[in-house]
Image (spheres, coloured by chain):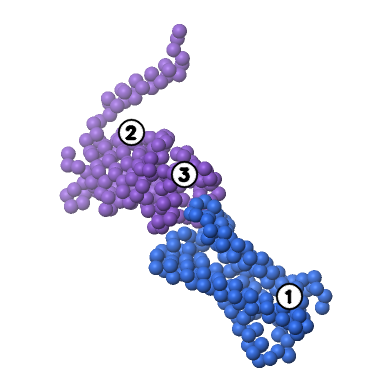
Amino acid sequence: MRPPILCRLLAAASLAVGLDAAAAPPLTSHYTLDPANSSLEFIFLQAGAKNTGRFPRFSVTLDSSGADPTGGRLEVTVDVAALDTGDKDRDDTLRSDDLFDVKHFPQAHFLATQIVKTGGGYEAVGALTIRGMTRETRVPFTFREATEGGATVGYLAGRTIVRRLDFGVGQGEWQATDQAGNEVTVSFTLRLTRAAP
Amino acid sequence: MALRNTTHRWGAIAQTFHWVIVALIIAQVTLAEMADDLPNGLRKLTLLARHKSIGITILGLVILRLAWRWLSEHPPLPENLKRYELALARFSHVALYVLLLAVPLTGWMFSSARGFPVSWFGFFQLPDLVPKSRPLYDALQMTHHTLAWTLIAVITLHVIGALKHHFWHKDDVLKRMLPFTRH
């Protein structure tokens, strides 16, 4: 029996990816987060009013083949349980079982194995996992490298919209979006330091 | 009934302001008491969001109402009142207007201080009146609560006064604010 067309296409695609990876330059630049000079914030609508919060604890690594992150690899791990909206009641509500359920899913994770150049900058294409659910997600960002005090640093910034219900953040009554909006804006301004090669 | 006030009767516009605000205040007290009894959750947030939207509505209506009162003539208090009755009537009316402005304003302020911005029925978001601060929130919340109960006390006095005029003095002070009454 001939293999179905989809399987053959997939095989061809994986072969192409494999060839592509072999041809890509090695990822020689390794950046890590400078947490004191970075922020990761989220904005959501509650009853039509903007509520803002931040994730004070997260880690970022970026591997690229130089000052241009195209073809690189970006990994972000967020300590969701540490979220902070400046109000304990609201934070506890967000951490609760029906929302982030931080008891079972204390971390969110984004792994982009594909970074492509776009008109305005770059786009990280990868797997975003929140509350145990993984979705392919594209995150646009800008990146520039600078030399500060002899050290090489990278500035990575951007914002994207995450639909919380795609990740099950909102069970039971929280599936309704009239009081707590589905679209959450996540914005980030990161300072990365490059490890000495 | 005429739209405008006359020297002996409140017009339809002033009456509408008065009775719509009465209905909204009843809704406000009901929503606040219902929300107070609930644990933190979606239902409480929903009730409080309505409470805030209605509060802003009252604030807007009171400003329009004061402008209308200032722009148009209005029926004077009866001439046969004793001095203390006149003083009490004047005091309670000024207190009503001041509290009708102060209660929603302090509510809006304490919401800002808590870091929960206020929106009007989800149509638009209002600016924060004060910066986010826990001590400020505590103080403003207590003020909002105290002023709200003071407003209820003055409203009670106002109702007693109106009923006293109607049943005791047998004048038209109550009737001139009632729709569907002949004068």
Chain A tint as drawn: purple
> Quadrant of the image for the C terminus of chain A?
top left
Tell me the crowding category of disc 2: few under 14, some 14 to 19, or many 20 or more residues within 10 angstroms, Cα based.
some
Element marked by disc 3: loop
Secondary structure category for the residue under label 2: strand
Tags 1 and 2 on a common chain? no
- The quadrant holding residue B67 is bottom right
Question: Chain drawn blue, letter?
Answer: B
Task: Pinpoint residue A127: horizontal percent, then vertical percent.
Answer: 38, 35
Pinpoint residue B47: horizontal percent, then vertical percent: 56, 57
* Residue occupied by mark 2: A113
Q: Secondary structure at mark 1?
A: helix
Circle 1 Cα neighbour tier, 10 Å, few/some/many (<14 / 14–19 / ≥20): many
Q: Cα distance, mark 3 to mark 1?
A: 51 Å
- Tell me if B40 is positioned left or right of A56 in this view: right
* Residue A196 sits in quarter: top left
Q: What label sits on residue B177 in the rendered view?
A: 1
Is disc 1 on the same chain as disc 3? no
The correct choice, above or below, for A39 with respect to B22 in the image is above
- Locate residue B13: give its quadrant: bottom right
- Name the amino acid type tagged 1: Met
Please state the chain letter of the residue tagged with numbered disc 1 in the rendered image.
B
* Mark sitting on residue A98: 3
Q: Earlier in the sequence, mark 2 or mark 3?
A: 3
Where B28 falls versus B68 (above or below)?
A: above
